[in-house]
């Protein structure tokens, strides 16, 4: 079901208009969707200036790739979040290589802070609550592996080193955790194993 946008236009409809070169649709999509993307980027990067730069890159990518958006492959929010996540992790890895240092742990207070009121609160809160509830259902070991990969941009090898666990164990936890997340997000009951 496409995401409704205040004013009765759906995100897929806005993206279709963006694909046709409609700058007003792009501006409206940016106003409504940028808080979601910026929140994720800030959680990964924690540097407001770098996050703002990455947000610009993400929406430039949206402008260029709008003609390739296929609603059959996922929601507009998922399409945007994957672009934001990929760009943020690319920037994080670039910063690590440049500084040759490890990133400090996430500051959860910054990650949870409201970054604007232009988002559709009902839709964004529902998505956030669904993901948080699904993550909460995971065993701690699986949740930790997924959080390190998604929010800190670590590879499975890096996670293995950070946690002091064998690479095979990390891969298994990631696979099982992702399977459980998919099931939880589909509303299926999870087993204890």
Image (cartoon, helix red, strand yellow):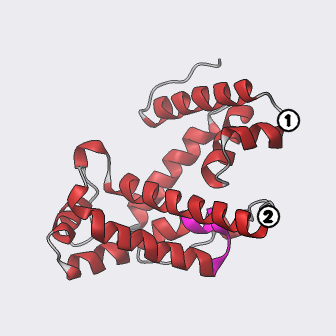
Mark 1 vs 2, N-terminal side: 2
The answer to which image quadrant residue 90 occupies is bottom right
The answer to which image quadrant residue 94 occupies is bottom right
Q: Residues within 10 Å of mark 2 (few under 14, many from 20)?
A: few
Q: Which residue is mark 1?
A: 164
> What span is colored magenta in the figure?
40-48
**Residue in the foreground of this view, choosing between 175 and 137:** 175
Can residue 10 be seen at all in this image of the molecule?
A: no
The residue under the point 21% across, 82% down is: 24
* Identity of the residue furthest to the left in this view: 20
Residue 107 placement, left or right of 134: right
How far apart, in angstroms, are the residues tagged by discs 1 and 2? 21 Å
Q: Which residue is mark 2?
A: 100
**Label 1 element class:** loop
Q: Is 41 covered by the magenta stretch?
A: yes
- The vertical placement of 25 against 153, above or below, is below
Percent x, y for residue 172? 65, 24
């Amino acid at each position: 079901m496409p995401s409704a946008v205040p004013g009765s236009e759906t995100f897929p409809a806005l993206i279709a208009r963006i694909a046709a070169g409609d700058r007003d649709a792009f501006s409206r999509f940016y106003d409504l969707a940028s808080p979601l993307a910026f929140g994720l980027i800030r959680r990964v990067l924690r540097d407001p200036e770098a996050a703002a730069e990455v947000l610009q890159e993400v929406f430039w990518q949206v402008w260029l790739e709008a003609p390739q958006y296929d609603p059959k492959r996922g929601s507009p929010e998922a399409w945007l979040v994957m672009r934001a996540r990929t760009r943020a992790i690319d920037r994080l890895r670039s910063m690590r290589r440049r500084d040759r240092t490890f990133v400090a742990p996430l500051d959860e207070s910054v990650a949870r802070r409201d970054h604007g009121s232009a988002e559709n609160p009902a839709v964004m809160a529902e998505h956030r609550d669904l993901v948080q509830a699904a993550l909460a259902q995971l065993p701690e070991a699986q949740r930790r592996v997924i959080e390190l990969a998604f929010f800190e941009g670590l590879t499975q090898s890096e996670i293995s080193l950070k946690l002091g666990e064998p690479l095979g164990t990390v891969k298994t936890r990631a696979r099982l955790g992702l399977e459980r997340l998919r099931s939880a997000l589909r509303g299926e009951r999870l087993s204890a194993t």
